[in-house]
Image: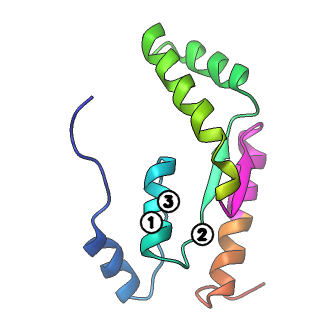
Amino acid sequence: MSGRYGTLRSEIERIFAVGKSCVLELETIGAKKVQESWPGAVTIFVEAPSVAELERRLRERATETSGVIEERLEVARRQIEEAADFAYVVVNDDVERAVGELDGIVTKELACVGRLSAT
């Protein structure tokens, strides 16, 4: 796979300049780079309940070749080892529960920085 992926620093700065926050979906390497650039960044690691469940989900989708699935599983295994480096870990065992947990984390963190009234 080739190409350049990323989020423009200027775009993040523009969002912050107008008093807003942003959510970025990143691989672990990108998340760590954001943490280095913005020490106040909040990181959330979202993981499948197990590698076996992740494999089942990927194979059930049938959108990728077996080789690509194996590559994704290897990346997932490496990234799971980095979960402890994140402020939060959310297990995506049930989508509604996981979304609720993510919503709670975002709400809490925005309230902590005064960008959302605590209710």
Q: Element under label 2?
A: loop
Q: Which residue is the extreme one toward the left?
A: 3
User: Who's the residue at 37% across and 88% down the image?
Assistant: 18
2 and 1 marks in contact (CB < 8 Å): no
Q: Quadrant of the N terminus?
A: top left
Which residues are the magenta region? 86-103
Q: In this view, does 117 lie above or below 103?
A: below
Q: Where is residue 109 in the image (x, y as percent from the top left)?
A: 67, 76
Residue count near mark 1 (Cα–Cα under 10 Å), binned few <14, some 14–19, many ≥20: some
User: Who's the residue at 78% across and 84% down the image?
Assistant: 119
Name the image quarter holding residue 47. top right
In this view, the residue in front, 47 or 107, is 47
Amino acid type, mark 1: Val
Q: How far apart are marks 3 and 1 (CA)?
A: 5 Å
48 sits to left or right of 71: right
Instruction: Write down the residue under mark 3.
Output: 32
**Residue 35 drawn in magenta:** no
In this view, the residue in front, 51 or 58, is 51
Instruction: Write down the residue under mark 1.
Output: 34
Q: How far apart are marks 2 and 3 (CA)?
A: 11 Å
13 sits to left or right of 53: left
In this view, the residue in front, 49 or 93, is 49
Instruction: Write down the residue under mark 2.
Output: 42
User: Who's the residue at 63% across and 85% down the image?
Assistant: 116
